[in-house]
Image (cartoon, rainbow, N blue to C red):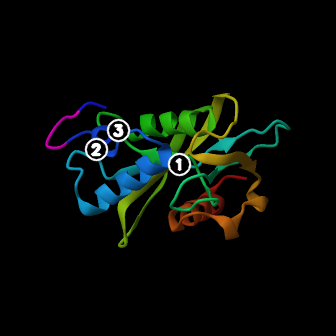
């Protein structure tokens, strides 16, 4: 990402050593307000997927980075400058779990006083690809709604979005 606007690009500031270092430095810079051209919106989304049996489920990843190392979350990440939320959702899903998706609609937006990021969550359906764990995940898996790992979720936004999805889904 080239440097634009009032500040340096994230890649210029954070370096490219490894994913964990990159994410830690980005988060620290965001909290310190040092990234003037960063968009403080995370496009996170739940994905309605069909597993190999055809039964379907929600795709979650077990994080390989902090915060939330070893905990489950849906694929997501930061929106790049010039990218729509829906484009970010599709890109992050491809990068994190190897799936192509089409968004079905906005599930909700979640914000917390102690967290500097607004989490925007979309429902989506898988249109292609093969489920796999990307660089920031220990594993990727589909879960039936009645088997979601409620006690092992990474963030409050993950729990709140999954609760909203389960509550509002069409059987």
User: Dot 3: within a 10 Å radius of its alpha carbon, few (fewer than 14), some, or many (20 or more) residues?
Assistant: some
* Mark whose residue sits in front, 1 or 2: 2
Q: CA distance from mark 3 to mark 2?
A: 15 Å
In the image, residue 169 lies in the stretch drawn in magenta: no
Left or right of 79, for residue 128: right
Q: Position of residue 139 (x, y in %)?
A: 69, 47
Q: Earlier in the sequence, mark 3 or mark 1?
A: 1
**Position above or below: 108 against 130:** below
- Quarter-of-image position of residue 48: top right
Q: Position of residue 62 (x, y in %)?
A: 65, 53
Residue 80 shows which numbered tag? 3
Near-viewer residue (144 or 22): 22
Q: Which residues are magenta?
A: 3-7
| Residue under pointer 2 | 13
Can residue 45 be seen? yes
Q: Residue at x 58, y 63 (%)?
A: 154
| Residue under pointer 1 | 45
């Amino acid at each position: 990402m080239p440097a634009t606007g009032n500040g340096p690009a994230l890649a210029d500031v954070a370096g490219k050593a490894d994913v964990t270092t990159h994410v830690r430095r980005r988060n620290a810079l965001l909290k310190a307000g040092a990234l003037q051209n960063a968009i403080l919106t995370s496009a996170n989304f739940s994905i309605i997927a069909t597993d190999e049996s055809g039964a379907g489920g929600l795709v979650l990843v077990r994080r390989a980075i902090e915060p939330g190392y070893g905990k489950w979350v849906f694929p997501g990440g930061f929106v790049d400058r010039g990218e729509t939320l829906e484009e970010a959702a599709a890109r992050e899903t491809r990068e994190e779990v190897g799936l192509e998706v089409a968004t079905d609609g906005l599930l909700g937006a979640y914000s917390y006083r102690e967290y500097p990021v607004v989490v925007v969550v979309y429902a989506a359906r898988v249109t292609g690809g093969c489920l796999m764990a990307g660089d920031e995940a220990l594993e990727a898996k589909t879960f039936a709604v009645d088997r979601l790992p409620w006690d092992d979720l990474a963030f409050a936004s993950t729990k709140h979005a999954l609760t909203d999805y389960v509550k509002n889904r069409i059987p």
